[in-house]
Amino acid sequence: MSVIPVTNSNAADAGARGLWGSRQAWLVTGLLFGFMLVNFADKAVLGLAAKPMSAAFDLDAASYGHVASAFYLLFSVSAIGVGTLANRVPTRWLLVALALTWSVAQLPMLWTSSFGLLVASRVLLGAAEGPAFGLANHALQKWFVDEKRQIPSSVVALGASVGTIVAAPVLAWVIVHAGWRQGYLVLILAGVVWIGLWLAFVRQEGPYGATSSASATSSASATSSASATSSGSATSSASAVATAAAGTAVEEARAGYRRILTCGTFVGSTLLGFAAYFGLALSVTWLPRFLQEGRGFSLTAAGTAVAVFWAVGGVMTLGAGIVSQQLTVRGVSTTWSRGMLSVAMVGVGGLLTVAGVLVDDPGVSLVLLVVGLTAPGSVFALGQTLAGQISPVRQRGTVLGVGVAISTLAGMVAPTVMGHLVQSAPTALDGYNRGYLVLGFACIGAALVGAVLIRPVRDAARLRRPVGA
């Protein structure tokens, strides 16, 4: 089965439905969900294999933190570079290139005992995974109109949670029974399988991409001309297509990148993303080790706990997307349905994280930390829809890439900060608590700034006006 191209002959039907290629759109959404699933399984393996791998490479806590941070050395740079490339190169091929590089980057882990090769493998993997979320959303937004993007974007983001939910217990079992290197082999094969499925089922870009607007406009024009001598239903269909094409044409108006990247919505949502990614980086690289060293879990129990942790995060991400889209469709301003909802998730997450550190009861503390660490994650999907809303479609790949690049800079900082705090603290638990306090206050601060700056309706209107108008 392949994705059916949108041609002039089916454009009228697409316009009449109000959503172009809905079956194809959700097929692509499902495959992009799988793309992010593999992506985060690749990230999760380092934390799950942390103790046996640290023993194999003779890494202390600080050294392990540096290895984890090396993953993000080129993460942001590649997010911008590939995001800009996506304005010119079909995203379906860029996604294949990324997934292939993931598998190649992890091959040395099957045999190497070299610390240098370990770091190089992590740097290459990070360079290939940096553009993944922005590129996936850029591809996704070519298949959905703006007001219907929150739920599919949240589904794609949900792949991150499900990837870790599936990976944590499975990889923990593989690591315990077959060794940590075999955990990497499983992920290499998963990447190859995803490439095969993507190539089999997706053979074109979506109808809401920059290159689609011209064909949509042409189709609308042709249909409108024919409708002059045809039935009223044909006229209605032509009107629907013309409306869709017009909506795309509005998006095509260009704006200076400096204006886009310095507007309040972009700055505020990116700052929220930075705080949320600080927590994500800690969770991916340190959570299993925290559960073992700070809470006394076995590796198997830590793998199960990590799966529960990401399940909670997945529910929050999807739930926030559903609430956001329902509010948007009902006419609530996206300042509230996207912007302030993002602010609330990050701010509340920060407060709960701080509370989790300060509460004495271990069980209550762990519950608060789980909810506090997962709540901000919903901002990744919502932030992508905010950036897509204010960005002209021909520039969207770059804008989404830059947003991801800035947000994920937190990944270079967070693992190293936690490693040094754990290494220098009287006990491992004290070090972890200090790291989570840093995260909590960062989320609270970002939420306060975001509440002031994020105004997507205002900023979208300003960016579509000529300079000086």
Image (tube, rainbow, N blue to C red):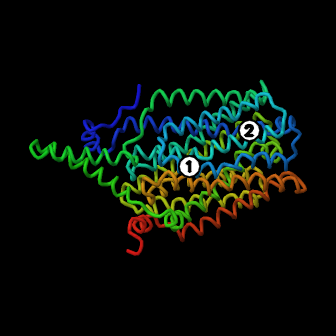
Note whether 197 is above or below 385 in the view shown.
Answer: above
Can you identify the residue that label 1 sits on?
Answer: 316
**Label at residue 122:** none
- Which structural element holds mark 1? helix
| Disc 2: CA contacts within 10 A as few (<14), some (14-19) or many (>=20) | many
Can you identify the residue that label 2 sits on?
Answer: 121
Near-viewer residue (61 or 192): 192
Q: Nearer the viewer, mark 1 or mark 2?
A: 2
Q: Is residue 336 left or right of residue 14?
A: right
Note whether 243 is above or below 156 in the view shown.
Answer: below
Residue 191 spot, x, y in % from top left: 61, 31
Q: Residue 450 occupies which quadrant of the picture?
A: bottom right
Q: Return the residue found at the far bottom.
A: 468
Q: Is residue 298 left or right of residue 19?
A: right
Badge 1 vs badge 2, beta-carbon distance below 8 Å: no
Near-viewer residue (26 or 408): 408
Distance from disc 1 to disc 2, alpha carbons, whole Å, reads 32 Å
| Disc 1: CA contacts within 10 A as few (<14), some (14-19) or many (>=20) | many
Note whether 47 is above or below 266 in the view shown.
Answer: above
Residue at 69%, 40% (x, y): give it.
Answer: 44
Q: Quadrant of the C terminus?
A: bottom left
Near-viewer residue (158 or 238): 238
Residue 291 spot, x, y in % from top left: 77, 44
Q: Is residue 136 left or right of residue 332?
A: right
Residue type at the position of mark 2: Ser
**Mark 1 or mark 2: whose residue is earlier in sequence:** 2
Residue at 75%, 38% (x, y): give it.
Answer: 48
